[in-house]
């Protein structure tokens, strides 16, 4: 799944517990008739992905929905959801920080060493 919009806020990296769990939050405002402010969490080594981004940049974020169950000491069960980011892409001018420049498809050289007798196990 993905969410797309402009960066409204990028939080600082926070560390929790003795194991050094790291979390960083970003808020993206969608660009639609009724804009939504979506908070996405990046955790552990993924927090570093946000270092090269700034407020106002248009981005596309790859996300996973996470859910967990918690039972209180009184036995009451509650459920919590979170949106966890795992990839972020800069949509301005088609750039991706730290990404590779890939030539357009028509700039690739055609393959001339094809043999019709080569085995092809593709089902289509």
Image: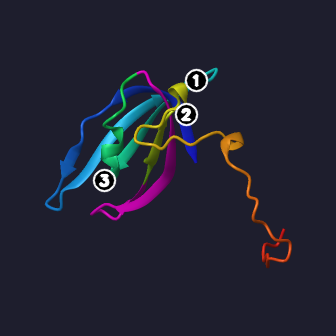
Q: Which residue is mark 3?
A: 45
The location of residue 120, given as percent across then percent down, is: 79, 75
The location of residue 101, given as percent across then percent down, is: 51, 40
Q: Which residue is mark 1?
A: 31
| Helix, strand or loop under label 3 | helix
Q: Would you say the magenta stretch is mainly helix, strand or loop?
A: strand
Q: Nearer the viewer, mark 2 or mark 3?
A: 3
The location of residue 116, given as percent across then percent down, is: 86, 72
Q: Which residue is mark 2?
A: 4
Residue 36 visible in image = no
| Label of residue 52 in the image | none
Q: Left or right: where does residue 61 sit relative to residue 42?
A: right
Badge 1, how many Cα within 10 Å: few under 14, some, many 20+? few
The image quarter containing residue 115 is bottom right
| Helix, strand or loop under label 2 | strand
Q: How is the image coloured?
A: rainbow
Residue farthest front in this picture? 112
Q: Are marks 1 and 2 in contact (CB under 8 Å)?
A: yes
Q: State the separation of the CA atoms marked 2 and 3.
A: 22 Å
Question: Which badge, 2 or 3, comes first in the chain's sequence?
Answer: 2
């Amino acid at each position: 799944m993905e969410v797309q919009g402009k960066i409204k806020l990028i939080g600082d990296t926070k560390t929790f517990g003795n194991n050094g769990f790291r979390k960083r939050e970003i808020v993206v405002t969608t660009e639609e008739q009724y804009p939504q402010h979506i908070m996405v969490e990046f955790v552990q080594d993924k927090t570093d992905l946000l270092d090269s981004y700034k407020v106002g940049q248009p981005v596309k974020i790859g996300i996973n929905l996470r859910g967990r169950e918690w039972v209180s000491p009184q036995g009451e069960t509650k459920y919590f959801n979170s949106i966890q980011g795992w990839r972020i892409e800069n949509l301005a001018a088609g750039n991706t920080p730290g990404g590779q420049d890939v030539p357009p498809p028509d700039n690739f050289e055609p393959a001339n060493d094809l043999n019709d007798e080569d085995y092809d196990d593709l089902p289509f």
